[in-house]
Image (tube, grey):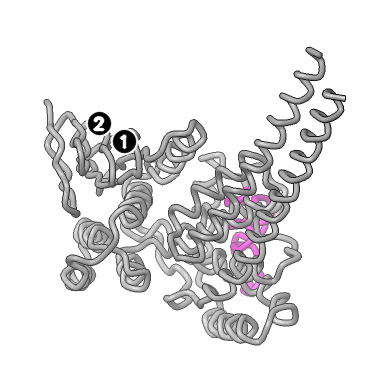
Amino acid sequence: MTAAALLILSGLTLTAGGAGADEHLLAGAQRFREAHYPEALVEFRVAQRLGSGEAARYAAVTLVKLGRPEEAIEAFGGLAGQEPDALIDYHRAVAAFDARLYLAADRILATVADRAGPRVGAEAARMRAEIAATLKAEPAPAAIDWYLRRCAEQRAQGRAILAAAYCEEAAGLSARRPDHYRRAEALRGAPAAGRGAKP
Amino acid sequence: MRKSWFYAVYAAGLVAAGGARAQDADAAHKLMHEAMHDATTMPGHGATLPDHTGPGHDAMPGAGAGMERERAMKEGLAKESATAATHRAMNRGKAAEAVDAARHRAMHQGSKDAAASHVEAASRAGMGAAMGTGAMGAGGAMHDAADKARMTGMHGGMMGGTPPGGMMGGTGPGGMMGGTPPGGAGTGTMPGGTGTGTMPGGTGTPPGGTGTAPGGTGTMPGGTGTMTK
C-alpha cells in the first residue's frame, strides 16, 4: 500500500511538472500574441526550465521582439544551420540583422524565401535587398576591426556563440576585400561558426 | 475491488492530465506560430556597417538611442523608454537624438500600460548600462528574478539597473531591487520592493520600496518609496 501511494505520488508529481511547462508555454504564446513580450519571455523561460523543448526558440523570438538581438542569438543557439520552421529562421535572421551580422542574416534569409509563405518571403526578400545594397561596396578595414573587437569582447565575457558569430562575420567581410584584411585572425576566432559553441 | 477502483481513477486522471497537457502544448505551438507570422516585420532600421571604432560608437547595434526611440514608438512603450533614450543620447553627446527622443517622450506622456513598459524599460536600461560602461546589463538579472519568483509560486519580482536605471512592477507580492544610479522606480498592482542598489531604491504602487539614496520616480499612479541613506 505504501508502495502504491509512492507510485501515485510520483506519478502526480511528474504529471504536474509536465503540465506546468505546457501551461507556461501556452501562457507565453498568449502573451506574445498580445504583444506583451516581457511577460511572454518570462513564461517561455519558466517553461524551458520546466522541460519544454520548444520554449527556448520561442524565448529567442521574443528576445528579438524586445530588441535584444545578442541574447536572442545565444538563445537560438547561434546562427549556423537551419531551423525546421521558416518563421523561427526569419526571426533568427532579424536577430542577426539587428546585431549587424548581415552576412549571417543573408545566409539564413536565403533559406527562408522558399520555405515561408508569401508575406514572410517578401519581407525576407526586402531584407536581403537591403543587405545587398549595404554590402555592395568593399568593406572598410574599420568595419572589420569593429567586428573583431566585438568578437574579442564577447569572448572575454565568455559568450562563445556571439564571439564566433562576430568573428565569422569579420572573416566574411574580409573575404570581400582583395587584401583579405585580418582574415586569418577572424577565421581563428570563428572555429565553431556559432552554433554548437558553448555559450 | 476498492483497490482496483482506485487505480482505475488514477489511471484515468493520468490520461486526462496527459491529454490536457498535449492540448496545451499543441495550442501553444499553433498560437505561437500564428503570432510569429503576424508579428513578422522588417527591422525598423537600415543596414549599416560600423565605420569607426572609437569610444562612443554604439557597442551594440540596434540598441542606440535612436533605435530605442523608434522601438518605443513602434511598440507603444511608455515614456520610460523614451526617457532612457534621451538620457543615453545626452550622455553620448548626441544632442539631435536627445531632442528627438524628448519629443517622442512628450508624445508618449500618459500612454500605456504600466507593468509591461516598466519591465521593458528595465531591460533596456540594462542594455544601456552595458553599452555605456561595459558593465553587466540588468536585463538578465531581471528575468532571472522574475523567473525565480514565478517558479517559487510568487509573482512580481523585479529589478533595477545600472544607469540609466530600471524599474518594474509586479503583479503580486514580490520583491524588487534598485540599482546603481539612478536606480529604478517600480509600479505594479501590488507591493513594490526594496532597493538594494547603491543609489535609489524602488517605488511601488502599494507600499514603495526603500533605497539608499534618492532616486527613481514612478511613472504611473502609485506611491513612492521611502528612501534611506
Residue on which disc 2 sits = B194
Q: Identify the residue at the far top of this view.
A: A2
Residue on which disc 1 sits = B176
Task: Give, as a three-letter code, the residue at label 1.
Answer: Met
How packed mark 2 is, by other alpha carbons closer than 10 Å (few <14, some 14-19, many 20 or more), is many
**Front-most of residues A39 and B3:** B3
Residue B80 on image: x %, y %: 24, 58
Image point 55% across, 51% down: which residue?
A151
Task: Give, as a three-letter code, the residue at label 2.
Answer: Thr
Relative to A142, residue B114 above or below: above
Magenta part of the protein: which range? Answer: A161-189
- Viewed as shown, does residue B223 lie left or right of A16? left
Q: CA distance from mark 2 to mark 1?
A: 6 Å
Residue B83 on image: x %, y %: 21, 60
**Front-most of residues A1 and A6:** A1
Q: Is residue A182 magenta?
A: yes
Of mark 2 and mark 1, the one earlier in the sequence is 1
**Chain letter for the residue marked with disc 2 in the picture:** B
Secondary element type, mark 1: loop
Relative to B214, residue B42 above or below: below
- Viewed as shown, does residue A146 lie left or right of B96? right
Question: Can you see residue B85?
Answer: yes
Verify CB contact (< 8 Å) between mark 2 and mark 1.
yes
Please identify the quarter of the rendering in which residue B138 is found: top left
**Front-most of residues A27 and B140:** A27
Image point 17% across, 29% down: which residue?
B212
Which quarter shows the N terminus of chain B? top right
What is the tally of numbered marks visible in this picture? 2
